[in-house]
Structure formats: C-alpha cells, structure tokens
Image: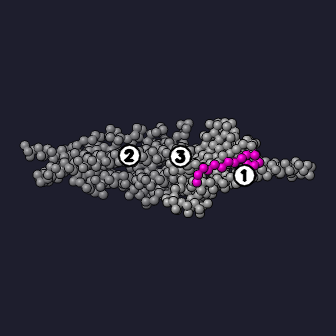
Amino acid sequence: MYYNNKVQKYYITLLKEQENTIALEVNKIEEQFQNIYSEVLTISNQQSIIDFLKKKDIISKEYSEDHFLHMMHFYTLYDQMRILDANGMEVLKVNRIDSTATIVGNQDLQNKANRYYFKATKKLNKGDIFVSALDLSIDSNDTYNENKPVLRISSPIFDNRNTLIGVGIIDINGERILHNLRSCGKLNRWKTWLINNSGYYLIGPSPDKEWTFLKGDKDHGRFYDDYPEIYPEIIGGENHTIKSTQGVFEVKNLDNKNTKLGYLDGALVRDKWIVVSMLENEDIKTGLDKLFDIKDSFLLFFSIILALGITFIITFNSHRKAKFQEQLINSERQLQIAIKTKDRFISVLAHDLKNPISSIAGVVEILSKEDAMLPANTKAKLLTVMENSTKHLLSLIEDVLTWSRSHSGNLVPEAEIVLSEQLIEESIKFCEVQAQEKGITLIKNVPEETFVNADPKMIETVIRNLISNAIKFSYRNSTIEIKAVRFRGKRIRFDVADHGMGMPHEVSTSLFALDKIASTPGTENERGTGMGLILCKDFIEKNNGKIWLKSELNKGTTISFVLPEYEFEEETEDNETINKIA
C-alpha cells in the first residue's frame, strides 16, 4: 500500500511538474502573440499613420518611423515592420539587419500587391488580425533564406470614413519566438517538441527533422513517422495527457481559444502549433527506482518554488505590457497635441507677420508713386506708420527667435544669488519712459531683503515684459505696483498689479497657451506680439518657478510668479554676501 501511494504521488507530481513547465512556456509564447496583436492594432488605429497615408504628412511619417524603431529595439523578435498603401506598395518600412533596426529608403520599397498575406488582410474588417502560416522570407532577388522562417501578422487600416487606405504588417522571426520552448526541452527529462497542424516538426528530435516542409522535403520530418499510433490523438485539437506503451505524452495547443490568454477576437490563424512533451517508460522506471532516495520535502519545495516562479513571471509580464501600452497611448496623444499646437502657432504667426509687412509695403507704394505730390505732414505720418510697423515686425521676430532658442535647448539658465529688489529696480528703469508717456506711476514695494537663486537676465526679461504689458493695458495717470514678498514653502513671490482694463475669465485662462496666441490692443490701441507671456512662462519654468494671473474686467490684472528663495547658512556669511551683491 505504501509503495502504491508513493508511485501514485510520483505520477501526479511528475505530470503536474511537466504541465506547469509547458504551461509557463506556452504562456510566454501566447503573451508574445498578445503583445504583437496589440501592437498591430495600435498601428492600424494610429492617427499619425492614417494622416501619413491620407495626406503624405512628413511629420507624421517621421513620428511613425521613430515609433517603429523604438518597437524594433524593444521587441527583438520583430524582423520587420511595414505600412503598405491600399495598392500594396510599401510606403514605410523598418528592417532588422543583424541586431540593428534600420529605416528602408524610398528607393528600396517594393510592391507586395500579389502576396497572399496582403490579399487576405485587405478582406478583413476593422479590428481583425491576419496571422500567416510559417513560411520563408524572400529578399529583393526572390531567393529563399532557409535559416529564417517568418510569421506575418497584419491588420487593415481604415480612415475616418471607414475606407481602406492601407495595411500594417509585422514580420516575426519564427526561430526566435520559439527559443524559450526549445531551451525548455533541453533542461528537463521530458522530450519537448513543437509540431504544426500538418504534423511537421518545428522543434524536433534533431535539426535534420525540423522545418522540412519549408526545405522542399515534405516526406520527412513528421511526428506521424515516429509515432503513428499517437498522432491521431494529438492532432485532435484538445489539451490532454496520453499514456501509451511508449511513455506519457503531454499535449498543449497554442491556438486554443479557451486558453487562459487566448487569441484576440477576429484573429484569423492560418496555422496551428501543438506542443508535445514525452517521458519514455524507461525514464519513468528510472525515476521510480530513485524515488525512495528522494525526500518528500524536496519535491514539495520544488513544486512550491515552481508555482511561485510561474505566478511571478505571469504577473510581471502583464504589468510590463500594460505599462508599455499606456506609454504608447500617451505618446500618441502628445504628438497630436503638438501637431495641432504647431499648426495654430504657424497660422497666428503668419497673420501677425502679414499685417506689419502689408503696412510697410503700402507706405512704400504710396511714397514711390506720389512722393512729390504729398504734403510734408502726410509724409511724416506715413513714415511714422512705417517706423511703428517695422518696430513691431522686429519685436515679433525677436520674440519668436527667443522662444525658438528656449525650446531647442540652446537657452540654458545660469543661476546666481540675486537680490529681489535689484531685479525689480533694473526692470523699472527699462520701462520708465514708456510709463511716463501715459502718465503712469510705477511703485516698487519690497518690504524686506530677499534673495532668489535664478538667472538674473531671464528674470529681468520676465519682469520687464510684465511691466510693459501692464502699462499697455492701464489707463492714463494710474499706478502699477511691483513687489516681492516671501511666499509659503521657502519661495519668493513677485507681483505686477495694474488697475487697467482687465479681461474676462475665459480670456485670462488661455494667455499662456501657445495655440491661443493673440495680440490684444491696449487702452490707447497699443500693439504687441502676443508672444510676451509665452516667453515669461518658459523662462519662469526654466528657473524652477510657476506663473499665474488674476484679472477682473475693468478693474485690472495681477500677474504673479514664484521662484526658489536662497537662504544663507550663517549670519556672518549673510552679511558678506549681501555687501558683495548690493
């Protein structure tokens, strides 16, 4: 009785061990397919690719190429990623050459309209996936590379009107995707093979029996030739255990839709893979002979470690997949926002450039045709219009260049310890003439000595812009207060407050947005570029600060920003440093 119980436990443990091992490896392969399916669907729904196919937009193409290069680097089993148009012509292609992903030039793109995988994918509905059979890759000379079996996974691409505009395809290295399963067969006592639905070995007892159907030898390399009595039970399509006179066979189907992960709905699988593991009766007998020399606690410990390992790997891979997909979605969303913002910015910039240039061109035309007939005072007025338009044009160009330098990384803050009062005083000096022309009084209010750690040139530019803006929107003979006070969290808050025309809430909330640029006339029809507050926001954020505003229509506006305060460690050092700065 004791012996029989031990034998029964041995069989159960043996089968469970193999079932868990094969389940882990099959799970890995199925999860690889799930990742590929998700990526193919992402490609077929990616707005940048749709824009590229519809509009031939170069920015969308460059973004898609970068995305493909990133994916090829992340998934080493990808051999090729392609976009074909509705006529089967390759329009975007990234190849793996050795271990490096490379963009294929336009001159090397080919027409694949006659390939079976393109014809099959064109017939699918949106969201469907085509999975090809394993076949051999073909190079530009149509010669076969017998060492590189390829699996092609594709999905149709539709525009917003549900019109087919292309096909997205990922080519998978068939050998690389099976690497883990091949290793599994080498590391345990079970013989592990992989066969297709025609019974041919993909992973077999020896290399000469593998992939024979792709090498022109369809009469050899079949599981049926080695185990004819077992083959009908294996090809039946169910996951099960088979006990025979030759040994124990464990069967696991890779295309079973009832598996834990399963395939996506709509995936059309042209081929089926079956994992077969076998433990020969002789190996079972050898194991039984050693059974009583093995501690039960060791078997229990091994089973627990194996189960924990499987659980950890499945959980880790699922988390990594979810995180990566989230990154892809965010990246796509950010690209769309950037494209829309760029389009709006260019549109507004073109409009603002057109006005002063038109004014200058009009004055030049009048003077060139009627100069002799114009009174002196009319000429003076025309020249004043030309002068103002020229200044406005130069100011706009300067703002755009400054903003461009800021965003290209060429404008880097050079932080110093600087007195807040000094920053305000230098800025007020720059704006005094502008204020005097409207009879506006600039009031400085810095109740105590405060220091900030920031780039003084950038911050003075910000304060000057804010004061100039306040003068523009203030009424004659009013006041503007500029102050600096300690703020919560060891920061210094700067305020520029006017009592001018103010603005409604819906306008104030969009002043710092690049895609909302607009130049609003001042209280005396003064003109600006609309770029000033955009630059202020960039400069403050580069100095680790924040900027905001409060405004009420016909009551005035207060624009505030905060910067990190600099605190001296010792009193003696405080006095010496203050003296040097002051």
**Where residue 334 is drawn, which disc sits there?**
3
First of labels 2, 3 by sequence position = 2
* Region rendered in magenta: 432-449
Q: How many marks?
A: 3
First of labels 2, 1 by sequence position = 2
Q: Is residue 162 left or right of residue 138?
A: right
Indicate the amino acid at tag 3.
Answer: Gln
Q: Is residue 369 left or right of residue 544?
A: right
Asked if the stretch drawn in magenta spans residue 433, the answer is: yes
**Which colour style is shown?**
one colour
Q: Is residue 246 left or right of residue 353?
A: left
Closer to us: 337 or 190: 337
**Where residue 319 is drawn, which disc sits there?**
2
Residue 394 visible? The answer is: yes
Where on the picture, by quarter, is residue 215? bottom left
Q: Which residue is mark 1?
A: 432
Q: Which residue is at 69% across, 40% downward?
A: 500
Q: Residues within 10 Å of mark 3 (few under 14, many from 20)?
A: few
Indicate the amino acid at tag 1.
Answer: Glu
Indicate the amino acid at tag 2.
Answer: His
